[in-house]
Image (cartoon, rainbow, N blue to C red):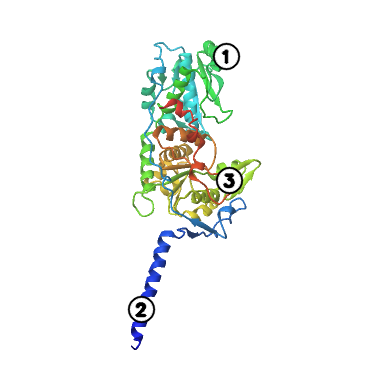
Amino acid sequence: MGVDVRQIAGAILTLSMFVMLGNMIKKDHFSDTTATLEVNYSNGPAPSEDAAYATSKGVITKEKEPNNLWRTTEPALNPCWDDKITKSTEKSAGFVQFRLSNGPHYHVSQVADAIVVAKYLGATLVLPEIKGSSADENSKFEEIYDADKFINSLRDVVKVARQLPNDKIARRTVLVKIPHRVTEEYIEENVEPIFRRKRSIMLSIFFQSIDMKIKEGSNPGIESVRCFGMYGVLEFHPDIRRVGDKMLKKLHDAGDGSLRHFVAIDLRMDILLEKGCENAGGSIRSGTKKCFGAQDVGIFLRKVGFQTDTPLYLTQSTWHENLNSLKDIFPNVYTKENSMPSDEKEQLFHSGRTEFERALDFFICSNSDVFVPAISGMFYANVVGHRIAAGRTQILVPTTKQNSTALLSDSVSRYIIDKNHLAYSCLC
């Protein structure tokens, strides 16, 4: 029997096709699914020595997002303080004044301490002014917050006056310093004697440390009033909430226009530089302090699994060249400058009033899908408290571990892992 060349050729071709098909199937189901992302550092500094463990000649591995990266919101918590707060007395023993400063993340604590003092003394609390960095930047309370809600919320706890009575204005008010998270003992020893003599005092609240952890052995009545002051009375002015909602919508629609998750990052160049991070775009150590610059944050987000098209919101108001290294990795980076509606910028952004900007930052970071603090401090501590109250506990803290991977679980805020934030004792 003669050999048919055409049959042999056909058999070889068929066999080759099966081999190719087998390789394709094997690759799709069993091979390493890791791809690579080329990162261009031409617009920013090259990876620092500390950051180099996550890169290899400008290449960062791109992996699938972990299933729990965008953890769904937990149920919002309810107040635990209602049955522990006594009703306010009919007659006021005098007046307690105070000022707010340093932004809403400090205001939360300042308001709570002032309410605690006024409640203990049986005094009327006077609506505060908001002190800016200069006299031109001072604001009225009702410009930033919902004053009516504040007064109505407190009507059964302490009396609130919109301003000091005329007959009291002419008198000299005594300034009394109190520490953040003031105790009953401190008020009794250092505040009450002066108040009983003068009947009108001005509180100056100082922060010895940033401590938002639960304290054992505290007076339940005092702590309940503090909880109420922190999580039950302050709400931003309707105009700020309206603009904040518009910004949230834009961030959720970022990219292709479909509903997306986004990450809010507390990253402000002025604060990083103030803390001694002279080159805050890279990974800088100042003494024993670790400063997470833009590039550090970008590499951290990639290591825990965020895709490069993830929208990022920064508390930095306008663009800074040190942010280029972050934008090289995550192109969809937003500041207030490019996320705020254009028709609102004149009032809230170009007005020169930083309180408006800080209020929007606090609002966005409290309501984002994920919050990442590049800077440890009061902003981080009080944003965490409001996120706990709302059930938004996906809070990731950049790690200093010198390895090529970062487990998502290792990066979750200790406030959440240990449930030791004050909010957990206030809400249940």
Residue bearing the label numbered 3? 401
**Mark 3 packing: few (<14 Cα in 10 Å), some, or many (20+)?**
few
Tell me which amino acid carries mark 3. Lys
CB contact under 8 Å: marks 3 and 2: no
58 or 420, which lies in front? 420
Residue bearing the label numbered 1? 189
Please identify the quadrant where the C terminus is shown: top left
Position of 7 with respect to 375 (left or right) is left
Q: Nearer the viewer, mark 3 or mark 2?
A: 2
**Mark 1 packing: few (<14 Cα in 10 Å), some, or many (20+)?**
few
Position of 198 with respect to 255 (left or right) is right
Q: CA distance from mark 3 to mark 2?
A: 57 Å
Image point 48% across, 39% down: which residue? 354
Whether residue 26 is situated above or below residue 309 in the rendered picture: below
365 or 422, which lies in front? 422
Q: Which of the two labelled residues, at mark 1 and mark 3, occupies the earlier sequence position?
A: 1
Helix, strand or loop under label 3: loop
Tell me which amino acid carries mark 1. Glu
* Residue 179 spot, x, y in % from top left: 56, 24
* Residue 81 spot, x, y in % from top left: 41, 21
Residue bearing the label numbered 2? 11
Q: CA distance from mark 1 to mark 3?
A: 46 Å
Image point 51% across, 19% down: which residue? 218
Helix, strand or loop under label 2: helix
Position of 111 with respect to 57 (left or right) is left
* Residue 359 spot, x, y in % from top left: 44, 37
Helix, strand or loop under label 1: helix
Q: Nearer the viewer, mark 2 or mark 1?
A: 2
Q: Which of the two labelled residues, at mark 3 and mark 2, occupies the earlier sequence position?
A: 2
